[in-house]
Structures are given as C-alpha cells and as structure tokens.
Amino acid sequence: MDIINKKIDKYVDEHSDAEPEVLKQLNRETHLKVLMPRMLSGHYQGRVLSMLSKMINPKRILEIGTYTGYSAICLAEGLQEEGELTTIDINAELESMARTYFEKAGLANQINYIIGNAAEIIPTLNQTFDLVFIDADKKNNATYYDMVFDKVRTGGYIITDNVLWSGKVVDEKADKDTLLIQNFNTKIQHDERVENVLLPIRDGLLIVRKK
Ligand SMILES: C[S@@+](CC[C@H](N)C(=O)[O-])C[C@H]1O[C@@H](n2cnc3c(N)ncnc32)[C@H](O)[C@@H]1O
C-alpha cells in the first residue's frame, strides 16, 4: 500500500534537499549489487534522519541495523564535532561496502562499526546515547527498545523505522509479522516513561523522547 500519493511523494522529494553525491552513489551501488535494496532509507527519509539528527545535535548515536551504511551516514551528519555513531549489523558481507562509504563521506573516524548480533552487542556498550535508531530485524524491535532504554539519557530519543509496515498495521486480519509491529506500537503508546509521535514518513518513523 502506498501511504502517500505518488504525485505528492514526488513533490515532497523535489522540495527537500537533494541527495548528497556520496549517498547517491551508495544508493545506486546498493541497488546494483545488494539484495533487498528497499531496506535502504533512501533520499527523502535520509534527509529527514539527517535533519532530526542536526536538531538533536547528539554526542553519541546508536544505530541497530547498518545494512550498507546509508542511514548511518545521514545520522552522523548531525553529530557534534567530537561525537561518535556506533552502528551494529549481523551481516559481515556488507562490511567492505559500508566501510568504503564511511571513508568517502569523511566520517570513518566518527563511526564505530560493529559486526555481530545486536542482542549480544548492546549489553556490552557502556555508554549513554542521545539518539538511538532501531532498524534491524523488526520482530525484535521491542527487545532492542528494552535493551537500550536505560542507555538513553533523559531527554534523549529512540527512533524506530517501518512501524506502519506498508500500511498493514491497520489491517483487521493481521499476519504474524504485522501483529509484532502492532504490539510494539501499542507498547510504546502505553509507555508512560516517554513522549511519542508516529510520523507517516515512508514506512513510518516512531519517534520517542525519554522523559
Ligand atoms: C532495514 S536494514 C537497515 C537499513 C539501514 N538502516 C538503512 O536505512 O540504510 C536491516 C539490517 O538489520 C540487520 N540485522 C538483522 N538482524 C540483525 C541482528 N540480530 N543484529 C544486528 N543486525 C541485524 C540486517 O543484516 C540488515 O542489514
């Protein structure tokens, strides 16, 4: 299901900043060489993530789900000068491509790229984060949220991608995957420790601010 009318989508793209050249190349190379290129955040969502990060101006960002590094680069654009983004992915096959683009974007020394299972890596991170982006295996959204919660500072943010699940969250007969997304969204809606707003951007970004 297209959540937003295609003509409106095009207009929105045309009235947002252009995709930076390095990200354009990464987008193209991902589409040519990597399975499931739809997973990449893409031009418009990438600009939204970059803008949100610039508004928060974080010192430490945690990303769960690097893929080819597109959203990591977008989020890192908003880092403080001495800031660092830690990004985790279980798929070692994409390592050299992601590292190449972190270099090309001039961000390699601000990105701590960890290959491994997020559920095993997160407990080993002894840092406090200003911003967390959850964009990995969707069935574990709630697990990652619970694991990172105490590592986010008061007033910090947790952003989760794909929470509209191609619009299936409003289906009356939800399949198993959709049910997991619905349960996660309901869990956040009832979490009194946070303020939350769901933005219907691309496949849905759920923004949570820790009170
Ligand atoms: C939707 S893609 C991430 C897209 C990326 N954030 C972007 O916007 O360009 C999801 C990624 O999560 C990774 N992933 C899946 N399960 C994981 C796990 N248990 N731990 C860490 N990464 C995982 C996959 O390998 C995949 O690269």
Image (cartoon, helix red, strand yellow):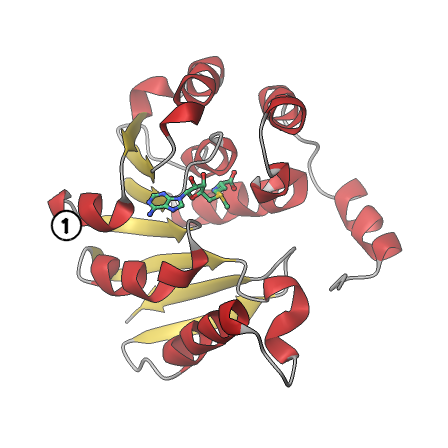
- Quadrant of image for the N terminus: bottom right
Q: Position of residue 187 (x, y in %)?
A: 37, 78
Taking the image as drawn, is residue 85 in sight?
yes
**Residue 63 point in image, percent of width and height:** 36, 43
Of the four image quadrants, the one with ligand 1 is top left
Residue, x 38% and y 43% (percent of image)?
57
Residue 73 location (% of width, % of height): 47, 31
Which residue is most to the right? Answer: 7
Looking at the picture, does residue 62 appear above or below residue 134?
above
**Would you place residue 172 above or below residue 206 in this image?**
below
The x, y position of residue 115, in whole percent, is 29, 31
Q: Which residue is mark 1?
A: 123
Picture residue at 32% right of the left edge, 43% below the top: 61
Neighbour class for label 1 at 10 Å: few (<14), some, many (≥20)?
few
Q: Amino acid at mark 1?
A: Pro
Q: Quadrant of residue 111?
A: top left
